[in-house]
Image (cartoon, rainbow, N blue to C red):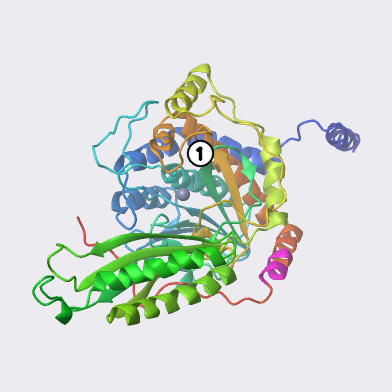
Amino acid sequence: MKLFTLALCLAVCVSAFGQKQKANPNKQSVIQSVDKHQSELINLSDQIWAFAETALNEHKSAKLLADYAEAQGFKVTRGVAGMPTAFIAEYGSGKPVIGIMGEYDALPGISQKAQPTRDPLLAGGGGHGCGHNLFGAGSLGAAVAVKELMQAGKIKGTLRFYGTPAEEAVGGKIYMAREGLFNDLDVCLDWHPDTEIAASTQSSQAMVDFIVEFKGKAAHAAGDPWNGRSAVDGLEAFTDGVNMLREHVRPSVRMHYAIVAGGDVPNVVPEYAKIWMWVRDSKRSGVEDVFARVKEIAQGAAIIAGVESKLTIQTGDYELLVNRKGAEALQKNLEILGPITYTPEEITFAKKIQEVQGGTQTGLDGTIHALKETAENPPGGSTDVGDISWIVPEITLVATTAPANTAWHGWSVVACGGMSIGHKGMAHAAKSLGMTMIDLFENEQLRKDIRAEFEQRRGGHVYKAYIPDGPPPIPAMK
Ligand SMILES: [Zn+2]
């Protein structure tokens, strides 16, 4: 009894003086587990980094993670939601059900060696310029650590790892969401590689991704142009209309397009043209307002050019619904865990990249950032994690895997993700997410508070995936 009182007093005294809090025994086990499996996790991440498979082509990457989960005792279901590279790994049974997501798709064209100057590993090949190799392996590392505690009988419930493909294009999570695969979760977690460590309280942009096709009538451009109807005229009238619209949208709106087909030769009136476009705004409702105008512009452009137009939605993301209660729980664990420390070689590596890219040479930021207020308009960028956050409360971590002042979705992020800077961020993420999962399994009141905030923010909105009917657009096997 005396000992207990002394221990209690010590704990209270330490926290009263603001000193570092200690992890409870289950959280200590999580930290030890990630350390124990560190070389395996690095191996998984490095292999996925080298595969550098793009959206829905992640066959080797998904297999690697799914096989590892299976070897660790998870029940693995492969090829979910019609995507061969999507899978779910589950352990345990009953309530609560806690999920964690992992990604593993790369970006085309930014292949890079793990070195601080530009040099592709494979000319023209893909690269992990968003660090998803670390994202997948790190989340699975957290899941394995928590699973070991379940196996030892220290935690009860169901643990689920979601292998989510094609974040950079298509939006694999949206197809998984449409199948209802997240519906029975109490809370879901994810993280993203970044230039700082923080429990994220920021949203992301909502967006819609669509194409507009114009169909006219070919004719000799000099001989009988009066018999022709130019699809390119339709496309040009469309972009004119969109660019006039820019003046009359809110500053938070972003519209960008690429002309995919615009005729072949000048001396034939083009019969086909195609444009690929995204509309983004801070909220889904804002996207829908602008998108309604853009649809009318497509119809008007077709009338102007005397051609037909067809608009097809490809995909779309919701904005991320922030959950502050969840972020606060994660923040406490980040503070227990403390910062990432770097070797002089790692700092030199980061500064070299910053020098090459013309950024300020600040090195690496391994500190734990304080919880921020949620900005009214999120920074630029969208994610299919946004969709999940409208189905289940979502807790999002960002962790340092690259230096600031360099181009994201660029070769510098690829370089750091294939060496110790990225590995350290991944291990740190696995630990803090695993520790937060312990809180979620152990603390019913925390789950209730997170759910109450989620319901209040969601305000009765019924989730509807922004994708066309039918199966996901699986590319032909290479
Ligand atoms: Zn990403």
Overall secondary structure of the magenta section: helix
Dot 1: within a 10 Å radius of its alpha carbon, few (fewer than 14), some, or many (20 or more) residues?
many
From the top left corner, tell me how far across and down residue 418 is, in percent: 39, 33
Q: In the displayed image of the protein, which residue is found farthest to the left?
A: 223
Where is the C terminus found, in terms of image quarters? Answer: bottom left
**SS state under label 1:** helix
Residue positioned 48% across, 59% down in the render:
90
Q: Is residue 258 left or right of residue 279?
A: left
From the top left corner, tell me how far across and down residue 235 is, in percent: 31, 69
- In front here: 331 or 11? 331
Q: Is residue 272 left or right of residue 129?
A: left
Residue positioned 55% across, 42% down in the render:
430
Q: Is mark 1 within 8 Å of ligand 1?
A: no
Q: Eyeballing the image, is 358 above or below 326? A: above
Q: Eyeballing the image, is 212 above or below 92? A: below
- In front here: 185 or 419? 419
From the top left corner, tell me how far across and down residue 382 is, in percent: 50, 57
**Can residue 154 be seen in this snapshot?**
no
**Can residue 336 be seen in this snapshot?**
yes
Where is the N terminus found, in terms of image quarters? Answer: top right
Residue with the mark numbered 1: 426
Q: Is residue 92 left or right of residue 85?
A: right
From the top left corner, tell me how far across and down residue 445 is, in percent: 76, 60
Q: Quadrant of residue 295?
A: bottom left
Q: Is residue 454 magenta?
A: yes
Q: Which residues are magenta?
A: 453-458
Q: Quadrant of residue 299?
A: bottom left
Q: Is residue 201 magenta?
A: no
